[in-house]
Image: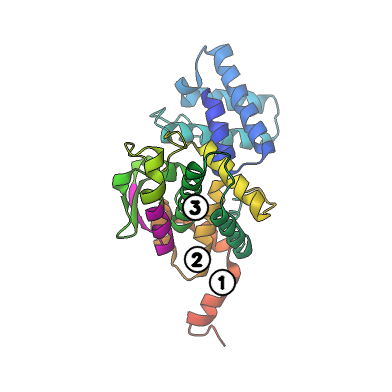
Amino acid sequence: MNLIELFIEHLKIDKGSSPHTLQAYARDLRQFEAALNAKLDGKLEDAREEDVQKFLKHLRDRDQKATSIARKVSALKQFYQFLIRENRLQDDPTLFIEAPVQAKKLPKALSPEATLALLQAVERGIDYQVNPELKTALQTRDRAMVYLLYATGVRVSELLSITLPQLDTESGLIRVMGKRSKERIIPFAPIAGEFLLDYLTRARPLLDPSSEILFLGQFGESLTRQAFWKTLRRFAAQAGITQALHPHMLRHTFATDLLRSGMNLRSLQALLGHADLQTTQIYTHVTPEHLADVIRKYHPRGGK
């Protein structure tokens, strides 16, 4: 799988991007790659800032629409940031490329009713066509995975890379390595701890007791983001959820639910691992009714 395909898979699974966005970004990146190969005989990972600037100048000289150029800039910036996070690149050639000013899309979260339906489907489990013992093990694993994802708001890549030494079921804590190798410690709810302990004692020994990776496939292999996404889609179908459900939506749901419950933005920022509070502030647009209630409750003149 080449770098563009890896990036598109990341957008599809981790971000839940629409087919239209995936096609457009793939087309934009291949256009930039073709420009590099034609004029510079270079590779995407060898591109420099001046290469990006020349590419954008070429687009402007051809009178391409500003919206089209803005999308290409967005595609390039996200692509190179992804390569850096995946440790495939050290320097970002788009770092000083001015990003177009665009309205941020509000994160999509599940409604409380949809969240409940999803968790009920998880507890019923998937009807895996394997022997009964392995079927129970996989269902126990799925339940622990989904509950931990919803209970902590971690990114799916963080979830699937958790190792046993990073987990403390007794204290109800996990230690994850986020973007830019920033470590954070996250508490999780007791119910998630119960399901994790059940998985560790009854199910995981059947998969591969010698591996340090927490969540494993039926052959003892590390789970991929694609595999987790497919599992989540099966639960969504069982729950009757019609909207496109992706792992990142559970992260949005986690953040939205905590903000609605009264958590302050600084605490939420720490849990989500956001480097900038502005990234966390987007959730304030998701719960305007709740924030209005907070003002009425706590502001000296809120109820007058």
Q: Earlier in the sequence, mark 3 or mark 2?
A: 3
Does the magenta segment cover residue 215? no
Q: Tell whether position 186 is magenta.
A: yes
Residue 134 locus on image (x, y percent): 48, 42
Q: Residue furthest bottom?
A: 304
Kind of residue at badge 2: Leu
User: Which quadrant would the C terminus be assigned to in this image?
Assistant: bottom right
Residue at numbered disc 3: 143
Q: Position of residue 79 (x, y in %)?
A: 52, 32
Residues shaded magenta: 183-198
- Closer-to-camera residue (253/219): 219
**Lower position in the chain sequence, tag 2 or tag 1:** 2
Please say which color scheme the image uses.
rainbow
Marks 3 and 2, Cα distance to the nearest angstrom?
Answer: 25 Å
Q: Earlier in the sequence, mark 1 or mark 3?
A: 3
The residue indicated by pointer 1 is 290
Residue 220 visible, this orientation: yes
Residue drawn 46% across and 37% down? 217
Q: x%, y% of residue 155?
A: 46, 47
Q: Between label 1 and label 3, give the one nearer the viewer.
A: 3
The residue to which callout 2 is attached is: 259
Report x, y in % for residue 267: 39, 62
Is the residue under label 1 in contact with that under label 2 (CB below 8 Å)? yes
* Residue 161 visible: no
Residue at x 60% of width, y 43% of height:
16
Viewer-proximal residue among 226 and 12? 226
What secondary structure is marked by label 2? helix
Vertical side of 91 occupied by 147: above or below = below
Q: Quadrant of residue 193?
A: bottom left
Q: Residue at x 65, y 48 (%)?
A: 244
Q: Residues within 10 Å of mark 1 (few under 14, many from 20)?
A: some
Asked if marks 1 and 3 touch (Cβ < 8 Å), the reply is no
